[in-house]
Each structure stands twice: as structure tokens, then as C-alpha cells.
Amino acid sequence: MANQPDPAHALAAHVCGTELDDVPAQSLEATGRDALDTFGAMLGGSGAPGIEELAGLTHRWGGLEEAGLVVLGGRMPAHHAALVNSAMGHALDFDDTYDKGGHVHPGTSVLAVSLAVGESLGGVTGGQLMLAVTLGLDVSCRLGLAAHDDRGWHRTASFGIFGATASAGKLLGLDKEKMVHAFGIAYSQAAGNRQCIVDGALTKRFQAGQAAHGAVLAAFLAKEGFTGAENIFGGRYGFFPMYQPDGYDLSLVTKDLGKEFFGDRLSLKPYPCGRPTHSYIDAAIKLNRELDLKGKTIESVTVRTGPGNSKSRYNVSAGAVKPSQQVEAQFSVPYLVGSALALGKVGIDQINFFDDAAVLSAASLVKTETVEGASGDWAELEVVCAGDERASTELMPPSGSPENPLATEQLKEKFRDCAAHSAVGLSGQTVEDLIGLIMHPESLTDSSQLIKLSTDN
């Protein structure tokens, strides 16, 4: 980085200088799909473990009533509303991922911040909201792509805070200098680790909220003239040297900046669980259909991989066969494969309830084998039923990716399903109205309509 400006300055100029007309139509369409998916995840996550406690504490603390909670209602300071709404959006692990950026989930903190700051300001149009979200997604994904080593950071939080800060700063109208300081203030708060996944802790969803909370604080402080570090990403003690010392490429942060918006590259999940498990679930659902497993006795389930297979970060055989709580269910490959084989699906109910005998029986059969000579990325799933009826399938890139996207109607059905699992019941008309406003933001005259509509029941 010697004699080169820190990438934070280019990002700040990009965020401050980009207007709605500068964003290609396909990128705005991608943002709308992501916003629909993320808002739906917030609805579905509103009743998830830990959210009631988080919302209750923020309500008890009180404060300026400037922003509201999705579905749950009640008003509070913008940074607290962003905290709770973002945690809701990540609670089911049903939110977007940037698969090539360390599986960062940028949407929940970006949208939660944009909604909270929009309410605080008032009069933010649908177009302004979508522009802020587009820029926030772009920043988060670029940072995720630039980091090559995996040190156990929960990138949704530790990287995502910068994208959320970009969204907040854009809505607040920060100039380039203050945007840089906002990024610096955000860096002081960047945190979040994956030990919570290993231990099945609720802090995984909290960390997404923490990023949103910190982003709102960073942008508002910068607006008031508060300063942060300016050599944020490549400085001597900058984010990448400190957080990713074993591998990063800062040139990727600004490559084709303003020409390509990385939110276009996001994957939208078909299943409410860890993204690296999705290829296994896809394969298991395929075999469920091929073998017509309903009512049949499964005798063995084998996952075969090449040496050093990188299809999943998670040890296939180490997950709980019978999870004891939600986070454990979301990251247990045996349990998720068992559900996909026995039921032909993995949905919200399957990560909420763990007592289906057929699912647990199939999960208990999942074993692994290493195939010497196979490529490191190769994997297959084989199922054998009574009577030696068997079938196998290779694992492919997971569904929901840009290469294999969910259709718009699938996203709408996912939204409706999430709404059906919300903490407070929503009428069918309310659900359709929310879908319409998010998919057609030109009809959204004030972004606060989304929060208000979700609580008018």
C-alpha cells in the first residue's frame, strides 16, 4: 500500500458519488430481489430464539422513538431498531450469501440499517432506499472477496459493518471525507467470530445485529464531525493486515468499481441453514425423488469425497444427529441430509422441531468415505434402501446461486412461508402488499411504510 491511497477513499467516493441513474437496471432488480428475500427473512426470524429477549431489552432501555421493529412493533432509537431487525433477518440463516466472499451475509445489516436510518430521516423514497441498499451490498461483497484466508471471523458481522455503514452514510448525505471517517469509526467496532457456530450459540444472529448497530452509530457520529482512522483497510494496523494477515488482495476491493455492483452476485437461499450445507441438501432431495423414499427403509447413506474436499467447511460426520437447539440444527449436515431424504425438504419447521423419527433415523445413517485419487472438490451422495435399491448423485454448486437462481415466484413463496412463521400473524393481503412495495419501489413514497405495514395487524 506504500504511496497508494487506502481503498476506503475510493469506496467513499463511489458511495457518495453514485446516484440512482448510475446503477444499471439489472442491478436494481437484483437489489429488489435481495430486499424481498431479506425482509422475508426478518419476518420469519421475528419469533426465533433470542429475538424476544433482544427486543425486550431494547424496549426496556427506551429512548428516542424514531424507528420501528419489523412485525413486533414499538419504536426506539435507530441504532437499536437496526440491531434487532438485523438479528431477526439472520436468525433463521435464511438470508442472502456471497458464496465467493467467505459466505458473508450482507443483506440483513444493510437493509436493517437502511430502514432504520430512513425512518429516522423520514421521507426516504423507495428509490433512495434501493440505492442505499445497492451500495451497501456492493461494499460488503467487495471486502469479502478481497479476503483469501479464513481465520474464523464471522464475516457477516466483521466485514458487513462496512457495507451497512455505506448505506447509512449514503442516506445521511455524508460527503467523501465524512464517509471515510464513518468507515474508520465502523472499523473500531468490527467484530464477530464463528465460535458461536461451533458452540450453537445465539450470538451468531446477534453479531449481524451488532454490525447494523455499529454502522448506524458510525454514520451519525461521522455526520457530527467525529473522526475515525483514514487508512482503514491497508494501513499499518488496517483491517486486512490485522484481520486477514495471511492472504488478501486489496485490488479486488476497487476493481471495476462503479461499473459492476456485486449485489448482482448474491445467492438467495432455498433452505434456512448454513450455505455450505446446501449442496448436500440438494443432492439428498434429488435422491428422495429419484428413489421415491416415502415409506421405504433406508439402509445406508454415504457421502464420498476426494482427499481434502472443500465442498463444505463443516465436518459432514460431526454434526448432531438429533439437534438440541436451532443453531445446532442449522449446521448439522447429518440432520439436514436426514430431513431432505426423509421428507424431501428442509424448511423452517425442520430447524425448529427435531423429533421426526424418520428424519432422525436417516440422519443416524450418514457416514463418510474418502475416495483416493478423486479430485479435491469432488463429492457424491449414495443412498441404499432395503432390497439393495440404490442411487447416487454428485454434489453440484448449490441452488439459489447466480448460476442457478431461484425464480421470482419461488422468492415470493419463500416470503409467504416466512410470513406464515412470523411472531405475529400477518394477513394475506398485508403479505401481498409488502411483496408489491418491495418489488416495485417506485410506488414506495416513504420507506417507513414497510415497517408500518408489517405491524398494522
Image (cartoon, rainbow, N blue to C red):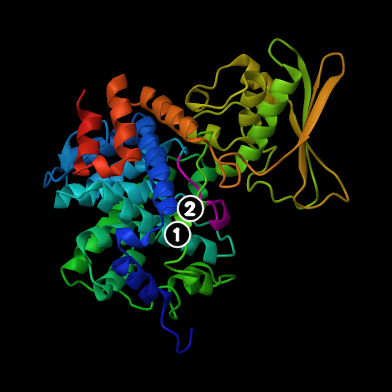
Q: Is residue 135 found inside the magenta-colored segment of the image?
A: no
In the rendered image, the residue lying farthest to the left is 64
Percent of width and height locating residue 291: 76, 19
The residue closer to the viewer here, 284 or 196, is: 284
User: Mark 2 is on which residue type?
Assistant: Asp
The residue carrying mark 1 is 261
Please tell me in which quadrant of the rendered image residue 164 appears.
bottom left
Mark 1–mark 2 distance (CA, rounded to whole Å): 6 Å
The residue carrying mark 2 is 264
Helix or strand or loop: what does disc 2 sit on?
Answer: helix
Please tell me in which quadrant of the rendered image residue 288 appears.
top right
Q: Dot 1: within a 10 Å radius of its alpha carbon, few (fewer than 14), some, or many (20 or more) residues? A: many
Percent of width and height locating residue 215: 30, 58
Percent of width and height locating residue 228: 28, 73
Quick check: can you spot residue 72?
no
Determine the residue positioned at 47% across, 37% down: 94
Determine the residue positioned at 23% across, 41% down: 444
What range is drawn magenta here?
95-103
Pointers 1 and 2 in contact (C-beta within 8 Å):
yes
